[in-house]
Amino acid sequence: MISHQMFLYYQEQPTVIALNLNRTHNGLYYFENQKYIEISAAKNIVNRQKIRELIANGVQHIFITRKDQNEITQQLIQQLRSNSRSLSVGNIEQNSRKQVNLITQTLGQFYQDSENNEALQLLYQASLNLTNLYKANQGLIVKNYQDIFKQNLPYYHKQPMQAALLITAFALSTKIFNEKEIENLFVVSLFKDMGLSKLSTKSLEEKKLSLIEKQIYHNHTVESVNLLQSRIPLNAPYYEIIRNHHYFHQLIDNPTSHNLKLLGIETTLVSLFDYLVYSTDPSSPETPLSMFEALQKAKDAISDQYPHEFKALILFLKNFLEQA
Ligand SMILES: [Fe+2]
């Protein structure tokens, strides 16, 4: 008897399975009438052609077993470790694109197994390697952003990477942060939603949250801190930034009742970029705004308290998005 717990849900990312899992140990399945139905037997080769056939036959959601998910995670970890080591050797544009993809996919796997300390440590180290590459090659960020923007990955897996890339490009362009602060801004933006790992990707993507799940969603900023504390070497103020990374969403609703200065520029920026990516991404669960509309809302909330930074932000985004 095949139980529900044995299976993992994958939405609309069959190509990711094809890239990372050449053969399944336990086959591919879809779910119909309360049953898992095998669509490709174990040990069969999973290639793009096979995936195309499944989509043509109307299969949208593919399931694999947890054993095969562990296999995917292990393969991703190996690839990410090896790419991190040789990031600045050879074609750095290709290496950085691969690094962004591998980090995003490993983050997605981590959401399904947040106890995996090996994956967490590697995500942290790989993020530092990537930001170090960006410090010397800022032009790579816009190319990597463009690439990840187009990837067919679950929204909740790629949103943190988009926010991390944007804030890093902005921080490098303004020169108001030192190198360590820039690394931390990337890490915090990438790791800020890890508390969502308490929820299934399926519930998140379909926006079908039970009352309890809604509560977990509401608390994910705190959950992210609980999950990370004492596992990665971040200083206490950065955990506070993670805890407050939805501050800007609240400000948009009520611009005059908060004092951003009390939170500091780093928190303001992390939550602002989180808001900008969240509210403008076409795959966002909410109806997306244009960047102009989102910035107009941001302006009401931020420009009185951080006029210079807001002006720098507008110039930066104009320049960055024109290239992207
Ligand atoms: Fe969040």
Image (spheres, rainbow, N blue to C red):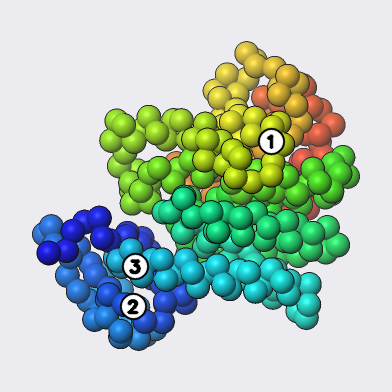
Residue identifier under label 3: 67
Residue identifier under label 1: 238
Q: Amino acid at mark 2?
A: Thr
In primary-sequence order, the first of circles 3 and 1 is 3
Residue 126: % across, % down: 67, 61
Residue 280: % across, % down: 56, 45
Is disc 3 in contact with disc 2, using a CB cutoff of under 8 Å? no
Q: Quadrant of residue 8?
A: bottom left
Residue 204: % across, % down: 38, 46
- In terms of secondary structure, where does tag 3 sit? helix
Residue identifier under label 2: 24
Q: Residue at x 33, y 78 (%)?
A: 24
Residue 192, visible in the rendered structure: no
Q: Amino acid at mark 3?
A: Lys
Is disc 3 in contact with disc 1, using a CB cutoff of under 8 Å? no
- In terms of secondary structure, where does tag 1 sit? helix
* Residue 48 in the image: above or below residue 240: below
Between the residue at mark 3 and the residue at mark 1, the CA separation in whole angstroms equals: 35 Å
Q: Residue at x 35, y 86 (%)?
A: 45
